[in-house]
Amino acid sequence: MTAPRKNIPADAPKPQDRKAKKSAAARKAEAEGFATIEQCGVTLRFPTKNLPMKAVLRYQGLNDDLTPIEPKQMIPTMGLRELLGAEQWSAFLAKNPTIEDFEQASDKIGEVLGN
């Protein structure tokens, strides 16, 4: 004799559907308008609100004087550098990241910022 099946709704979350809970530090940083990611063993903290104007300009492809950034391929690099700030950018570069590492960091930040 087999045990009766439980009626579980089809849309009930399954164990693999649950997201890990954020740490208290992550929740506090998020409430303060910051988020963190880890890339190449470096924890990178960046604003999610009140973005630095220079970072916004760089991501829009503009220099401080509003002239276009050339070459265009530098736009993501310059934007990320401005978003992270000199100290974190140096720490990231000290890990000798690859292009793939850079793209992964950019993608993670883009997901957090909704881009």
Image: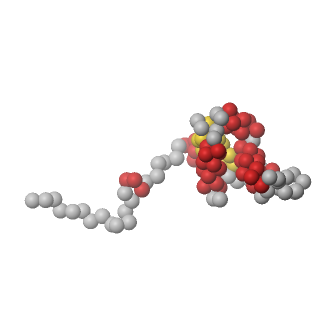
Q: Does 63 sit above or below residue 38?
A: below
Residue furthest left in the image? 1
Residue 29 at x, y = what percent? Answer: 63, 45
Give the left or right position of residue 73, taking residue 12 as reference: right
Residue 16 at x, y = what percent? Answer: 40, 53
Does residue 93 appear anywhere in the picture? yes
Residue 48 at x, y = what percent? Answer: 67, 52
Give the left or right position of residue 88, taking residue 39 as reference: right
Which one is in front, 98 or 3? 98
Say which residue appears at 76% left-offset and 38% top-offset: 86
> Which of the 4 image quadrants contains residue 8?
bottom left
Q: How is the image coloured?
A: secondary structure
> Which of the 4 image quadrants contains residue 11?
bottom left
Give the left or right position of residue 26, taking residue 71 as reference: left
Does residue 32 appear anywhere in the picture? no
Residue 107 at x, y = what percent? Answer: 62, 52
Which one is in front, 57 or 100? 100
Say which residue appears at 21% left-offset and 63% top-offset: 5
Say which residue appears at 65% left-offset and 35% top-offset: 96
Give the left or right position of residue 27, taking residue 3 as reference: right
Residue furthest right in the image? 65
Say which residue appears at 85% left-offset and 52% top-offset: 63
Residue furthest top in the image? 94
